[in-house]
Image (cartoon, grey):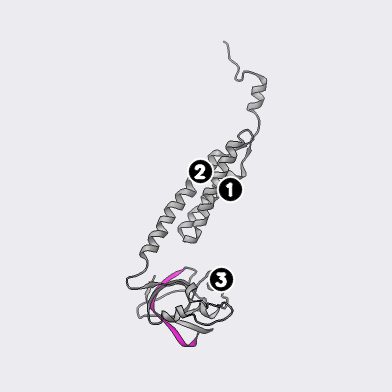
Amino acid sequence: MNHEPLFASEAEAQEHLVYRDMSKLAVTALGLGIFSGLAFLAASLLVIPAVGVAVSLAALVQVRRRSQELTGEALAKAGLAVSLGCFLLAGGLHAYIFATEVPENYSRVYFSSLQPIDSRTEEVPPRAEELDGEKIFIKGYVHPSYTGGQRFVLVPDMKTCCFGGTPKPTDMIEVILAPGLRIDYSLRRRSLGGVFHVNAQQRQVGELAGVPYRLEADYLK
């Protein structure tokens, strides 16, 4: 019984057995794809799938250009598919939330608009004074000084909410919850709405002094 040789020549056989390294970019692309699911937790984390898409494309180009040296095209394609899918789905979800989360008759406000015009001072800016008495919607974190009840301080970022730092005055809003509303301390970012006030005299809330803003909250999520 005749058997045809698997390879036409010894040179071809040796070429077939050449070892190819796995592309590190392709491995990184797959890793970013796996972590891209975190983008569903917060819009700021959309950067993960965005970087994942870029790295996956770079990995595909690299592997195809150096096909005799590198392997990993399947990993790069998988990373691209997952990263792109998470970016589109999570981005669409956050866009929908942004478009629908502000209750009717409330105005969206950011902590950035409550900061002094001159960063070297602690003066309440004219923009904040214009909001006095208006119904606003704002997002932030419960400061860890909160021990329960209807009164706490809202801060803008994880730095002061999670590690208990002392925020600067214009990063603090005294929140007074309407009857029936309840909040527990957590690391979760919260959405609140209510009537905003600039305190005529800066107040002390628990261990935090010099709080210039107050929110009489009737909306909590």
Can you say which quadrant of the picture contains the N terminus? Answer: top right
Q: CA distance from mark 1 to mark 2?
A: 11 Å
Which of the 4 image quadrants contains residue 149? Answer: bottom left
Residue 165 magenta-drawn? no
Can you say which quadrant of the picture contains the C terminus? Answer: bottom left
Q: Is residue 51 above or below residue 219?
A: above
First-in-chain label (3 vs 1): 1
Q: Which residues are magenta?
A: 189-203
Identify the amino acid type marked 2: Ala
Q: Is residue 178 left or right of residue 41?
A: left
Identify the amino acid type marked 1: Thr
Q: CA distance from mark 3 to mark 1?
A: 29 Å
Please tell me how crowded label 1 is: few (under 14), some (14-19), or many (20+) other residues with Cα within 10 Å. Answer: some
Residue 49, given in percent of the width and then of the height, sits at 50, 52
Query: Residue at horizontal 51%, vertical 52%?
Result: 50
Residue 219, given in percent of the width and then of the height, sits at 36, 74
Identify the amino acid type marked 3: Lys
- Is there a contact, CB below 8 Å, between mark 1 and mark 2? no
Q: Nearer the viewer, residue 23 or 133?
A: 133
Q: Is residue 40 left or right of residue 28?
A: left
